[in-house]
Amino acid sequence: MKKFSDRIAAGWFQGAIPPALLVLLIVIVEIGSPGFLTGETLALLLANTAVLFILATGVTFVILLGGIDLSIQAVASLASVILAQLLPSLGILAFPVAIAAGTVFGILSGVVHVRLRVPSFVATLATGGVVAGIALWIAQGRAITIEEAGRQNTMWINGTVAGLPVVAILAAGVGLVSFLVLRYTRFGRYSFAVGAGEPAALAAGVNVDRVKIVAFALSGTLSAIAGVILASRLSSGSPSLANQLLLPAIAAVIVGGTAITGGLGGVARTAVGALIISIVRIGMTFVGVNIFAENVVFGAVLIIAVAITIDRSKIPVIK
């Protein structure tokens, strides 16, 4: 009984660390740059965090299973290219087409992982390579500018509602729906069960393969949504548009408190992690850290976060 209560206390303490860190970072930035905690600055922070949060939310579904999705940045970039290519001819319908492409490639990653028994690391790395190649082929290796006619269909994403950026509202909507899916649906319960112990979930009659494919499909879909939002904000689609977002997205999930071994975490934690990553970026800008050194910092943060959150009892041998 004591051992169980100790585990509950340890889990509570671990879950409290990210929000406490977020508050500490906000205080530090406010002290270093008075006026940070203004409505305008916070709205800008939420807008700049939105794409990262949506991307991180998608990969949260996969990490909760104990897997990983390394194709998210390629899928987001492909969606941006498809949107930029199709806006002139399809108008607003280019959005669902681009997002559907992300869903298809998410399902492909899941099928390769589940049916061919390929580890998720390799399956999504390979799928990401295929997707990146398709994006390069479609765009002929260049960025595609969304012309004035196409921008008429993307202007709403750059607008505001009651002082809040539309992109932040979209991210909040994605977060809320994802939270409800994980909390109140059978898929959500099964995801935690698979992440906590796949053999036990199988023994309980859970269709593990289906749960995994759905998780990868959701990851691909949300990656594509992030890609079309990013393209709309920048008025451009590119085969490499989201290449710098893979490491921050995964770091946001792990820093937020979702265990890399699965079974523990969720979308609310990812939201905290995404805000932490955004504020770290702001802090590096204020300190004068070279933009090319950002991934060095995110890599170090990711190593520390994994070392803290990993459940070593699930992995008898670290390979």
Image (tube, rainbow, N blue to C red):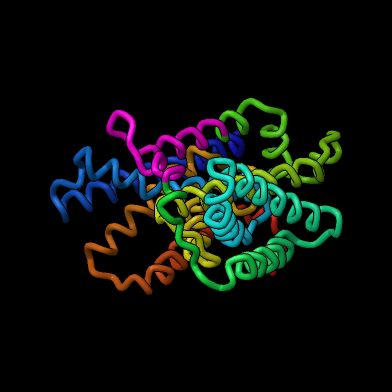
Residue 121 horizontal/vertical position (percent): 69, 63
Which portion, as a residue range, is magenta?
A: 152-177
Residue closest to the eye, 180 or 305: 180
Residue 211 horizontal/vertical position (percent): 75, 41
Residue 58 horizontal/vertical position (percent): 58, 47
For image coordinates 62% across by 33% down, the residue present is 182
The kind of secondary structure the magenta stretch mainly shows is: helix
Residue 196, located in which quarter of the rendered image? top right
- Asked whether residue 176 is in view, the answer is yes
For image coordinates 29% across by 51% down, the residue present is 25
Residue 235, located in which quarter of the rendered image? bottom left
Q: Is residue 156 left or right of residue 74?
A: left
Q: Is residue 160 rendered magenta in the image?
A: yes
For image coordinates 44% across by 67% down, the residue present is 300
Q: Is residue 190 above or below residue 213?
A: above
Q: Is residue 217 rendered magenta in the image?
A: no
Residue 55 horizontal/vertical position (percent): 53, 50
Work out which quarter of the rendered image holds the C terminus and state it: bottom right
Instruction: Determine the residue located farthest toward the top in the rendered image.
Output: 184
Residue closest to the eye, 299 or 161: 161
Q: Is residue 168 left or right of residue 57?
A: left
Instruction: Determine the residue located farthest toward the left in the rendered image.
Output: 34
Q: Is residue 291 left or right of residue 73?
A: left
Image mark count: 0
For image coordinates 51% across by 42% down, the residue present is 10
